[in-house]
Amino acid sequence: MGVDKLRQAFCWNRDWAWLLFRHVRNCNLERMQIRSATLADVPAMTECLNWAIRETDFIFRDTEATIAEREEYLRQNIADGCPWLVAETEPETPGEKPQHLGWAMYHPYRDPSVWKGCYETTIYLDPAAQGRGVGTALLGELVSLARADEKVHTLLGLIVDTNVASIKLHEKFGFANVGTFKEVSYKMGHWLNLTHLQLML
């Protein structure tokens, strides 16, 4: 499936065309836009993810993702009828290339035939974009979409407890801390706890 068809399946068939170029002004970046992700965004999104894998303990995974793997993941998310958003700088002049700032999505939590109405959030920011309002803008859009999505009953955020900024970000949007799994993975020389946050819609 080509980029145009992916965009059409995600945006037009889901009545989310308005998201394609929604401008966000109330953040620390002077000019930023959030739009639906396409296959063309996968290399930048993959590098953003791989930075977190290499440099942080915020994700259990310790092997880097491939572009092919992430392309398939994007296709599956679209097939599941779920949004995948990209934040980037808004070009000020014709021909200026936008700078990738981060991405966010929600997807079915585990087996959707069992965990009905449960969807898990995922958000990753480029290191240079952290602390500049990008995460707030992305998660705000994601929560708004979930509230309008009839199949979503609750959003779950599963966050390693060393990622304090992400926990605080989710709490800003009303996610409640509903418990922590202790020492469920090991990375960078120490055991990791997984905090569970939940937003009822």
Image: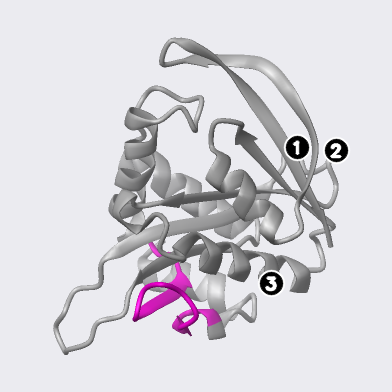
**For mark 1, what is the residue?**
111
Q: Quadrant of residue 39?
A: bottom left
Is residue 43 placed above or below 50 in the rendered structure? below
* Residue ID at (42%, 57%): 131
* Label number found at residue 114: 2
Q: Amino acid at mark 3?
A: Ser
Quarter of the image with the N terminus in it = bottom left
Count residues near mark 3 (Cα–Cα under 10 Å), then give few for <14, some for 14-19, many for 20+.
Answer: few
Seen in the image, is 5 located left or right of residue 145? Answer: left
Q: Are marks 2 and 3 in contact (CB under 8 Å)?
A: no
Count residues near mark 1 (Cα–Cα under 10 Å), then give few for <14, some for 14-19, many for 20+.
Answer: few
Seen in the image, is 55 located left or right of residue 192? Answer: left
Q: Secondary structure at mark 1?
A: loop
* Residue ID at (77%, 69%): 147
Seen in the image, is 93 located left or right of residue 43? Answer: left
Residue 125 percent across, percent down from the top left: 41, 52
Answer whether residue 39 is visible to the viewer in this image: no
Direction top: furthest residue = 189
**For mark 3, what is the residue?**
144
Q: Earlier in the sequence, mark 1 or mark 3?
A: 1
Q: Are marks 2 and 1 in contact (CB under 8 Å)?
A: yes
Q: Amino acid at mark 1?
A: Asp
Quarter of the image with the C terminus in it = bottom right
Q: Are marks 1 and 3 in contact (CB under 8 Å)?
A: no
Answer whether residue 116 is visible to the viewer in this image: yes
Where are the magenta residues, as a range?
A: 19-39
Direction left: furthest residue = 95
